[in-house]
Amino acid sequence: MKRLDRRRWPGDALWTWLCAGCVALSLFMLITLLTLLVARGLGHFWPAPLEALTLHSGEQVIGQPVREAPLPHGAGSERLYFTGNRELNGADWRWVALDDIAAVNEPEDAIRLERSPWGDVTGRLAALEVEGERLTGAPARARLQSLLALPAGQRPRGELVLTTAQGSPLVQPLATITAFQAPNALSTLEKAGVWGQGVWRFLSEGPRAANTGGGVWPAIFGTLLMVIVMSVIVTPFGVLAAIYLNEIAHQNRLTRLVRIGVRNLAGVPSIVYGVFGLGVFVYGIGGSIDTWFFDEALPSPTFGTGGLLWASLTLALLTLPVVIVATEEGLARIPDAQREGALALGATRLEMLTRVVLPMATPAMLTGVILAVARAAGEVAPLMLVGVAKLAPQMPLDGEFPYLHLERKFMHLGYHLFDTAFHGDDVEAAIPLVYATALLLVLIVLVLNLTAIFLRHHLRRQQGGSWSRS
Amino acid sequence: MTRPALPARTPWRQLQDRIATGLITAAGIGVLLAILAIGVFLFWETLPLLTRFETLSLERLSPLAWGTLKAAIAALVVALPLALGGAIYSALFMSERLRARIKPILELMEAVPGVVVGFVAGLVLAPWVERHLASALALVVWLPLCAVLAGLLWHATPARLRGWLPLGRAGLWLLPWMAAMAVLALWAAPMIEQRWLGDDLVTLLDRRFGLDYTTRNTLIVGLAMGFAVIPGVYSLAEDALHDVPRSLMEGAQALGASRWQALWKVALPMAGPGIFSAAMIGAGRAVGETMIVLMASSNAALISLSPFEGLRSFSAAIAIELPEAPPGGLTYHLLILAALVLFLFTFLVNTLAETVRQRLRRRYRSGGGR
Amino acid sequence: MVAFLNDEPAPVMTFPAGERCLSVRDFSLAYGDKPALKALTLEVPRHRVTAFIGPSGCGKSTLLRSFNRLHDLNESAVHQGRIELEGRDIFARDLNVSELRRRVGMVFQSPNPFPMSIYENVAFGLRLERRLPKRKRDDIIEWALRSAALWDEVKDRLHRSAWQLSGGQQQRLVIARTLAVKPDVLLLDEPASALDPISTLKIEELIRNLKNELTLVLVTHNMQQAARVSDYTAFLQQGELVEYGPTDQVFTNPKRQRTENYITGRVI
């Protein structure tokens, strides 16, 4: 007989540890993903130092280090530099093998300019010539800063003289410069300021240079507008359908069947909704509207092509089950005693619903709508079919009558991310912005989901406290 | 004192009530009809295909069908062990307080948009794995071993120290351990690769077995989509296991069964249908996911068994080709047929899962509450 | 079972037309194919407390809920026969059910105040029909709360949530809420079963006081309670009316063996 106190390694404990490992591994994956997004998405805005390299060949290079990668066959590793000066070097990027580098220093006068044609420039600031003055060093940078704060039209004529890495002078007219960075001359605090500005510009500006620079404001705005239009459609219909199912319809086999059907629709792939939206809303309804009301514009379609309205409608259909299920759950939680109490006081069904039942179900409805919005904000596949645009020339909301242009295409954060990452010309330049966009999207969706979770948690506690007695 | 006899209906309030009821009914039925319309539309638009049956259609659809299947299988191979293992641990072994924190966090994984997962998989993970294929494959074997190793070490430590790292919180404290072990593997794998294989694994595969290696391949799709499928399966399976009446498990343990035996003999048979339906729902998600497949695979429509080659699924084909396909053309109808297949498949799978789940709930109720 | 043999039929209890408030004639009700009430005939006198007693599932609550047609909510319920309130058929097609429910108020087994303030709970019924000036409404609310013996306890916190009250206070609030619409009849469905003994006593005292103003019908399975507060008692069993008479008589000198068995606690 085995002794009771003997400790042994039970064979089946192995499985327990494997299972624990599964939880740890899943968490590990999630944390890695989020860390990656946060680090790369936010790190991009931190001004990287401008390094001046001297290679063994005697060549000079000025650039910002981006990342390192190992060379094949274990021959050390190489580093990618952003060098700019496309018109001189033929490319913005340069790989330098670490073994080739003879010396590295970070000169204070190294500077990176953003300009409208030709992309960015790096070099050393030789002088700023403006209004007959010739400034150098720190005063030049300070003056440049104040000049760039003015709109391009009001700036005095002037030129910036740079020395490129190769030592040749480069003259840049002030009017073409949009921003500059002299990261080596900045203190940590000043860098933090630049970082904050970078984040703000990312959030508030439109994209530049074929989506490789600038910000994502139109995409944020487009996403927001679409989600709002969608909520306006989905909330009343979802809530009414839930009320019908739970409060009015006879509870029988058919209702149960419908309920399962609605629940299952949440599992139907979003692309299928996109196909439905394209076939019915865009080609079907949109095409008919065009032939009836906009035939002078044909064959170029007005409503017969993807647009804000159709995208919102499609996503509304997609998120209907979410709202219906959440609202129904909220309604089912309300004890019948509350309904009977209202009816026993002589309330009609409408009065019972509007005065007692719906106020009690409001948090549940809100939870449903928030979850629907979170789902819609992250959904891209159906939008590719019904109305998203790579770069929308016009915002769907402007000062022109009727202000809200439901037929226009719009930009969407998720699609912007996809398009920049996979269809851009200069993916290397776009990747940091893609990270930032991805981080923004994840943050939006997570915050929405957390709100819904807290709302639901709060709701359960409140009801657990007081309704259990009834 | 007595009031006059009851008045007949007061018209206005009753009328309001009637109108509102009518409106709600109309809206409710309208919504249900709109939902029904999805299926009807898809059927209707595939009908023209029947009139012009061409063998071409089959040729064009079969690589897509294979791609869809391959992607879904790859995702499930990744997701099912992780999700079910996680569910078993957190339902039966994890401390209740930690479970209340960890479960919502894992469920939040589901909220990460597919486009973000696809981007990270396609542009970050895929190039990395191509460069470090041996390390990546080593991790797959090494990390589970590490979990077991942690268990062995844990059982070997004196009980006094074990109190600091209880099994109930292992899901959390294994995290730094696994991270350290992963770093170790990443450091060691290239050296082993050089020593034993003499060359890069990717080149070796090509030379020795003639296997092509595509950067964005099925392996990447499986990992990325597995990530997306885990939370859904985990959540449902965990619910099913956690709802098994505690008294039954305790009864089995009182008879001398170990916790794992009790799980195997009592909890799993009881929660089996729930776990099955969780897996079904995971399969439905994997089959229909669009952005991840689109971004993490090469989108080449080919039929191959190799996990290192790309694929193209129904959903990706729809997303890429449908906007360009003129309505009414053959491609248009074929793609709608693909959508119909996706719709029917997910709908049937989900209905099955839901029915099983409801039956299970009834069984728990009759099996006695906790 | 032997007791059945020498059981004599119960005398029918009737009241003169002027004292009748509710009268039930051959009333049957079934849920689907399960009968709940079988051809009941009885009369409820005005301004008295009538108690329905019987084992659980005997149909006493069903009968009570029929008086204000709350069983309408259950789609499977089918009924036959007549119920009259002050001589008016409550199942008449042109009858206003809302009005009927205002005239026949109901208090439920467990307190169900709405998730609103105390004030709003009492004002709920008042706000449904016509707009009252605030002064008048305040007066009615104070009167209702005083009638329910709750005013002194809540007058300083009328605008606090009703869910903060204790169980007994909540039940009296529900009574006040019902009184505020000035019903003719108050139906009480085991109003004290979820309460502690002191709250129960308060409710019972309230019931005795209220009978000066309206007709009360009380369902209870607590026989002492029925004996303490009611004037007439009806004993129901398996959907049938077994015995109905003045409370003293039913409890001290039951006419039928089944009643006696139940009252003396013998297993039936």
Image (cartoon, rainbow, N blue to C red):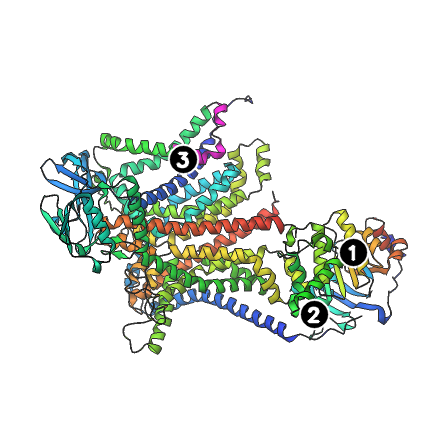
Q: Mark 1 — on which chain does it sit? A: C
Q: Is residue A402 left or right of residue C265?
A: left
Q: For the residue labelled by badge 3, is the local secondary structure a helix, a strand or a loop?
A: helix
State which mark lies toward you, 2 or 3: 2
Q: Is residue B159 left or right of residue B332?
A: right
Q: What residue is pinned by disc 3?
A: B175
The reply to whether residue C5 is in sight is no
Q: Amino acid at mark 2?
A: Glu
Residue C154, given in percent of the width and then of the height, sits at 69, 53
Residue C119, given in percent of the width and then of the height, sits at 66, 59
| Residues shaded magenta | B158-176
The answer to whether residue A318 is above or below residue A405 is above
Disc 3 crowd rating (10 Å Cα; few below 14, some 14-19, many 20+) is many
The residue under the point 25% across, 50% down is: A430
Residue at the front extreme of this rendering: A132
Residues at marks 1 and 3 on the same chain: no
- Cα distance between the residues tagged 1 and 3: 65 Å
Disc 2 crowd rating (10 Å Cα; few below 14, some 14-19, many 20+) is many
Residues at marks 2 and 1 on the same chain: yes
State which mark lies toward you, 2 or 1: 1
Q: For the residue labelled by badge 1, is the local secondary structure a helix, a strand or a loop?
A: helix
Q: What residue is pinned by disc 2?
A: C99
State which mark lies toward you, 1 or 3: 1
Question: The C terminus of chain B is located in which quarter?
Answer: top right
Q: Residue C206 got which mark? A: 1
Q: Amino acid at mark 3?
A: Leu
Q: Is residue B167 magenta?
A: yes
Q: Mark 2 — on which chain does it sit? A: C
Q: Nearer the viewer, residue C223 or A442?
A: A442
Q: Earlier in the sequence, mark 2 or mark 1?
A: 2
Q: Is residue C132 magenta?
A: no
Q: Amino acid at mark 1?
A: Leu
